[in-house]
Image (cartoon, rainbow, N blue to C red):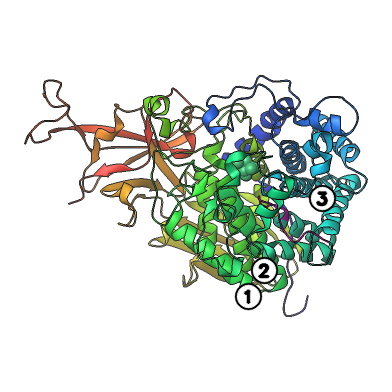
Amino acid sequence: MDELTKLSLNNVQITSNFWKRYRDLIAKDSVSFQWDMINDKGKMDVTNAAAAGGAADHSGAIENLKIAAGRSKGHHFGFPFQDTDVYKWLETVSYVLKYHFDQKMKDEADWTVDLIADAQDDDGYLSTYFQIDAPERKFKRLQQSHELYSMGHYIEAGVAYYESTGNQKALDIAEKMADCINNHFGPEDGKIHGYDGHPEIELALSKLYEATKNKEYLNLAKYFITERGRDLDFFDRQNKADGIDNDFFPELRTLGERYYFADKPITEQKDAHGHAVRVLYFCTGLAHVARIEHDEKLLKSANTIWNDIVKKQMYITGNVGQTPAGEAFTYDYDLPNDTDYGETCASVSMAFFTKQMLANDFAGKYGDVIEKEIFNGALSGIALDGKHYFYANPLEADPLASKLNPEKKHISLRRSSWFACACCPANITRLIASLDQYLYEVHDDVILSHQFVANDAQFNDGVEIKQRGNFPWDGNINYEIENPNLTHFTFGIRIPAWSLDKYVVKVNGKGVDTNLENDILYLPISDKATEITLELNMGVHLVRANAKVRTDVMKVAVQRGPIVYCVEGVDNQEPLWNYVLGQNPSFNYRYQSSLLNGVGTLSTDDVYYLEDEDNDGNLYTFDKPKTAQKSRLTLIPYYAWANRDEKQMNVWIQQAEI
Ligand code: FUB
Ligand code: ZN
């Protein structure tokens, strides 16, 4: 190879014990379970309709496609975007088949692709609600119709399935769909000058462009990105023409353009607002297109929104979207813990957005957020059995409050098997099944390892990297790099924010200069074999929020490595809010293989429990000092909460700080 080596990643096999368990669970249990759900075979156990788009006893998602394909008769069932549950399942399967081949699963997926092809109109259109029950309204009420959202999800699935199995039909459907959209939308006269109320198509078209190199798809993605927010009357005009109250979601008509992140062109947007998943899907496409096009303006906008979220609107766990009202962002530093929404889809899409940002710019902060999501906010969306899911992910929960306080009724203390609006289950499974895509970024002669997920990875020119370790429980990471052709390249390792104060790196047993660039350590590699060891700081951190965050004043969160911990009523005395940590609490860490499928727990005796004073049953007492008793507190990883009895939970704990 010549001076500037162009490296590329060929393959990654995840070997991490922690992640192998999750990925095998998805392959063996979640995929077949979800298949039953979308085929109306399993029992739908919606624990909390308030956080699930209402109650429903079946999905109808495959049946809708059968009706559209002429294989069955009847009306459409469910939300206008019901098709997406099938597409996200198909996308999960695409990734699973790469690490756990299963002929039955592949047969079901092939059958599904054939069904989708049959359901697709000759012109490429596919949205079963409109095909079955309202063909005259196609593309006429984009504020609420989710047509491009639904087709975007198919395009993602089609590309993934084609790339995983070589199924050409899966890609053909996607291209036909994109061509149909291209025929209807764009700046040219006679086309619709508008966009979907729910972004998704932007990121999907960018992926389709990468797979096909058809520039039209990239141009169309860019059109949707730059058009959004330019014509503030677009949705209203369409709604009026379609019949003003002919809504799919009446509550979505009057929310205003802000809710749709369509109140200004993206280059004028300064913060994340409105529906969280809409913003994050949009920004994923934005950052992707900006990178391919080297568009500095769009990149700057992506940066602005990412920074606003991470610096001012993201929970310590990575959850985003502070209010159930519209599943939305609220405002900077408003981070209520017991009413938040933190939709699983929002955390998953925050990982999507951040992955795109990292591909644009190798900086440790992006790897930090991906890590935060995969070990905390997004991961809490799936139960340890792989067959139950959270829609909302609070940082504080109380069964009584969820039952009796209407403002907290969206907070479930048990994950549901499925939802009437089932966007979250297959979103978290597709993220975990594609985790191998989240470990490295490669640019020219630089390989960046930004996640500590043990794996074997093969690059071009014979370069192989093995990462070993028992992360997230252990901070000793080992890399073995084989470089048979003596290629000269640079190997980057992200040093996580929680370990920047203390870490040790050795190359072939010798200490090295640990100067970092944007929290990344760069090491020149040119030998045939190189061994790198990294010791991360696995001490327990007390995390404090910025003082502008009202709800976390005088409180701390406890973090060890990437894992944010929580306190659960199962292990501790309720009410949990009476615990007050001492000023410098020390924690014992213990890995418990038989608890919650194997977790590291923390416990401390440097804690007080506020006593229930002798107040004769009075709600208030005058001038009576509070007393407290020495106590003991046990913490478990946040992602693993709500897998036992329904009890209180909180992440933030009071601390006697002064
Ligand atoms: O609107 C489609 C999906 O349903 C959104 O992405 C989720 O937030 C849920 O509202
Ligand atoms: Zn969701």
Ligand 1: give its quadrant.
top right
Residue 156 visible in image: yes
> Pointer 3 and pointer 1: residues touching (CB < 8 Å)?
no
Residue 19 visible in image: no
Examine the rendered structure and indicate whether residue 105 appears above or below residue 226.
above
Residue 180: image location, x then y, percent: 86, 53
Secondary structure under tag 1 reads: helix
| Mark 3 vs 1, N-terminal side | 3
Residue at the spot of label 1: 296
Examine the rendered structure and indicate whether residue 41 appears above or below residue 379.
above
Most common secondary structure along the magenta stretch:
loop
Secondary structure under tag 2 reads: helix
Examine the rendered structure and indicate whether residue 5 appears above or below residue 131.
below
Q: Is residue 199 magenta?
A: yes
Three-letter residue code for mark 3: Glu
Cα distance between the residues tagged 3 and 1:
30 Å
Residue at the spot of label 3: 163
Residue at the spot of label 2: 290
> Pointer 2 and pointer 3: residues touching (CB < 8 Å)?
no
User: Where are the magenta residues, as a range?
Assistant: 191-201
> Pointer 1 and pointer 2: residues touching (CB < 8 Å)?
yes
